Amino acid sequence: MFIKQLQETVKDAFAKKIELDIQSGNSKRFLGRTPKGAALSIAQYSGIVEYDPAELVITVKAGTALRDINSALAKNNQYLPFDAPNFSTESTIGGVVAAGLSGPIRPWTGSVRDYVLGIECIDGRGDHLRFGGRVMKNVAGYDVSRLIVGSMGTLGIILQMSFKVLPKPETSATVYFDCSQVKSIEKITQMGLTSLPLSASLWVANKLFVRLSGSQAAVAKGLEIIGGNRCLDNDLWQKLRDHTHSFFHGGSPLWRVSVPANSAVAEIGDECLVEWGGSLRWYKSSQQNEQFHEYAQKCGGNAILFRNGDRSSDVNGKLHPVLGRIHKQLKKSFDPGNILNPGRMYKDL
Amino acid sequence: MNIDTKVIEPDLSPVGLKGLFESFVDIVGESHVLTEKEQLYPYECDGLSAYKALPLAVVLPATAEEVCEVMRLCHKQNIPVVARGAGTGLSGGALPYEKGILLSLARLNQVINIDPPNRVAVVQPGVRNLAITEAVAHLGLYYAPDPSSQIACSIGGNVAENSGGVHCLKYGLTVHNVIHLKVVTIEGELIEIGGGGLDTPGYDLLALMHGSEGLLGIIVEVTVKLLPKPDVAVAILASFDDVETAGNAVADVISRGILPAGLEMMDNPSIRATEDFVKAGYPIDAAAILICELDGTEQEVKSQIILAQDILSQAGATGLRISESEQERAKFWSGRKNAFPAVGRISPDYYCIDGTIPKRELGNILVEIDRLSTEYGLSVANVFHAGDGNLHPLILYDANVDGEFARTEELGGKILEACVIAGGTITGEHGVGIEKINQMCVQFSRLELEQFHRIKAAFDPRGLLNPGKAIPTLTRCAEFGGMHVHDGNLPFADIERF
């Protein structure tokens, strides 16, 4: 019923050229470019459709709260291994997939798109489409499910998705070392070349925090090898993931710079926080500027203006002209009327 | 749909072809343009030899720049292009197009850079899968995806097909292990997809390229992730009196929190065939065996072996053996890895199917395969990537018996349709190519197929890249079975196909 109505709404909007602003938990309104258009909420379309722990697969509707999914999985000692941020308790799984953001564990287990097996959506014509499936391996047709992850609602209104889930590690432990950013990158890179059961890293305020996860025996052995001081803050990783850590307080522009893990340290911005074994670097900067794009490009990565600052600017940077053309054609192929979250990701998309 | 209207007809007259071939020679050199029939025969098929065709020419560029130039020329003259890596694919994805050229990437075979601190390697598309691991082994690193053809298959083809292998339950498919691609578009432009970091803004074209079967662009460089080699790997060989019990044991292992590096299953006909061939020490009277491999640190593996043994016994295993050495572990695997050639010894020909189902459907699908096997009068031996529900039924047939291949193909098609009904898919890791193109009509609706065609047009509006593969035209679906496309209503409309 909800789907039929939604299809009618989209068909009508397509015919009348009404721009739609797709919403759910609204915990990531700050992300991307300024939303515009008529509000269209999918929050009521919620619930776990199917979950069979032995299959390692869960199928959920887009409006389902992330916390509800996490607790259903936790009852069976399983989890979504990309550890998506819960920017508010209202975060829903549809938004998680639309934004494609993963948490501190990402370099070791993978990202949101790595665990998406199938997606059901309504495109910009109001057509109901299903791609992928509920099985682990599926190479029939183009991988549209993964294409939709991180597309910020510009390709389709996500209705339902299936994920691969994993057994939760038996235990975790965190230690820290006092060291500079340069030293921290050296140290974590070295650890990454061994079979240590790493599951998160954080460098902030001249401290490197390292988490190990796995069986009791493997974590104990790992702690013995790396040494360091035991960290007693049990919420550290959650605070990092959900941006409630004090680093993320305040209203200055926040840059998210994604680079090769071993990239040289740059003296840019006012303050810096590094996670993902060196490959994700957050900068706070009192002024908006190009230096983050320049630095990222020099390292072979990219920078986005994640939070605050001018949300009408090119917050995701600029696409190479040929890539820009392909993006536009793909957008048009899903949403010929340009009515789904127009301009949320890039100005003309 | 974005259809280019200013299309010129290619000139395929002897004079026109002569001019075209000369232009290719100007780009890649005389010895790298093959046009004589006897030169073309080695390229007439890929690993699916039932389908054969000869291209106009085989062109073998040596660099990404040469690929760009060849593509510009083909685009200008409207010549279709089929890309080919090592030609080991099992779905006819690299089957030549008669009115087009075959673009072999075999000469782009260099490892460009190995970057241990960032745990990546930059390689050209013609580098063999196993050669990557060999190039980094001295650093204690390896490249995880291991399709069974890894000794011969090339990484470019792995990306195009999104290849799997026996370790993907834990380590993922090709798409999970590649961070950056250089791709040449049909217009001959070089683009970069993905990046040096883990996340890239914009649409996930990196994911889209994986498994796109050469329909969207030509892959000319691949940056793969490398992993530290696990300290220890141990395999358990478990035997069972019936196949369903073995299937349930797979579910038990996984729901108790173990994530095996590999979890493989073989049925009795496969066990017998391989034991005759490689003497892996398999129990020939068992209805099914499971190979469960655990890897990681010594402590981790030790504790998991105890748990896994316990679970498998409780699940009804009649025999359990644990590899005591690397040699013994390799011996356990030798049977599984030689299952296909072993079956090749007991039958003149065999045809490998590649469906995937939810694991709980394993018992049902085996009953259905058995029923179909009797109905068609053809034997089937089964090997599975049980951990991720990927089935490889091998249909035994004799190509010299009139009509037997046609019956085999039909049986294969029926098995795949049964996989779709069971909530699965027609291909887990081998790709659609030309082989499963009709079954695509069963798995997807008219609207979804139309969307696939629009995605194709976003990259290649004239449809010059690998024409006729992977995505069926709606006309083809209508011919395959009028019922499949009727007002967008599918057969088995009551079945969730999500």
Image (spheres, rainbow, N blue to C red):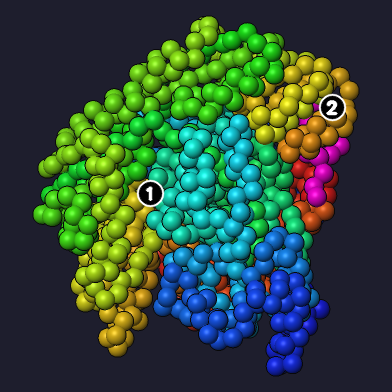
| Mark 2 residue type | Gly
Q: Measured from the top left, where is residue A22 in percent x and y?
A: 69, 42
Of the pair A314 and B379, the residue shown nearer to us: B379
Residue B395, image x, y percentages: 29, 70
Residue A86 placement, left or right of A18: left
- What's the residue at 55%, 64% (across, down)? B85
Subunit that carries the residue with mark 2? A
The image quarter containing residue B84 is bottom right
**Residue type highlighted by circle 1:** Val
Q: Is residue A89 magenta?
A: no
Residue B89 point in image, percent of width and height: 47, 65
Q: Secondary structure at mark 2?
A: loop
The residue beneath circle 2 is A309
Label 1: few (<14), some or many (≥20) within 10 Å? many
Residue B166 bears which disc, if any?
A: 1
Q: Which residue does the image show at 48% across and 20% down from the upper left?
A: A212
Eyeballing the image, is B126 above or below B226? below
Q: Residue at x 74, y 19 (%)?
A: A272
Residues drawn in magenta = A303-320
Badge 1 marks a residue whose secondary structure is loop
The location of residue B457, given as percent across then percent down, is: 69, 67
Task: Classify residue B180 as left or right of residue B325.
Answer: right
Label 1, label 2: how far apart the Cα atoms are: 48 Å
State whether residue B380 is above or below residue A130. Answer: below
Q: Is residue A265 above or below residue A1?
A: above
